[in-house]
Each structure stands twice: as C-alpha cells, then as structure tokens.
Image (cartoon, helix red, strand yellow):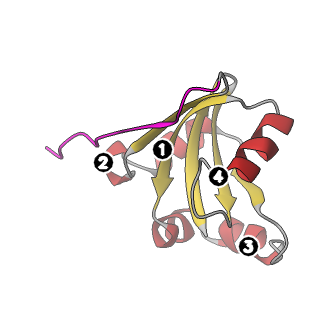
Amino acid sequence: MKVVLLFTGSGPVVIVTSYAEITSPMLLEKLRAKGIDKFIAYEIPVELARQRYGGHFQVVMQDLHETDDLRVLDFSGERAFRLFHLRELGPAVMFEGDGAAPAATPAMPAR
C-alpha cells in the first residue's frame, strides 16, 4: 500500500493505492478515467499518514477492499499542505500522459 500526494491540474489530492508504483499502467488508466493525465507525485510514509489523518485514515482503510486499488484520502490540498512538511515526502515522480516516460527527480536535501 502507498499513500501519495498528487499535484494535478485541478489541485493537490492525497490517494491510497495498492499498486507498487505510481506509474503502474493500470493505476495510470484509473487516474486518466478521473481526468488526471499529468501530475507530480510524492509518496507519504503510510504510518505518517495514519498518524496525521487519525480516524479519517481508519475510515478510508476500512472501506478499502483487497480488490480496490485506489481510494482518495483527501481532496483538500490546503489540508495536505498543513499536515505534511515537504521534507517528509519521498522523491518527486513526474508524469505526462503524452507518452513520455515518467521521470523521477532527486529529493531536495534537508536543511
């Protein structure tokens, strides 16, 4: 399971997915179906998300079945920005639905 902060054209969103990689073709297809075909993604450690979202995280996870592979944890980019420091996020993964290969960028050093 992964928790991911996606920066999309319509704003940030936090998702939970069972896919091992954010660039998994099946996950990308599900995101495309939701109108997301270009994004910058940052993984959030699962335990950190569980701690910061508290009961809401538990509710979303109880609703997550083995066959489910994508759940939206947070539609509010403003809340996600309040809950997580950028230094707590994993390296950036950029994706454009134009057929270009996904690119990972190195994380910025902590200060």
Q: Earlier in the sequence, mark 4 or mark 1?
A: 4
Tell me the magenta residue range.
99-111
Q: Which mark is residue 87?
A: 2
The residue wearing badge 4 is 24
Amino acid on which the number 3 mark rests in the picture:
Met
Question: What residue sits 86% from the left and 37% below the top?
Answer: 33
The spot of residue 86 in percent (x, y) is 36, 43
Q: Earlier in the sequence, mark 2 or mark 1?
A: 1
Quadrant of residue 66 within the rendered picture = bottom right
Mark 3 lies on a secondary structure that is helix
What's the CA distance linking mark 2 and mark 4?
Answer: 25 Å
Residue 97 appears left or right of 62 = left
Mark 1 lies on a secondary structure that is helix
Amino acid on which the number 4 mark rests in the picture:
Ser
**Residue 60 sits above or below residue 6 on the image:** below
The residue wearing badge 1 is 82
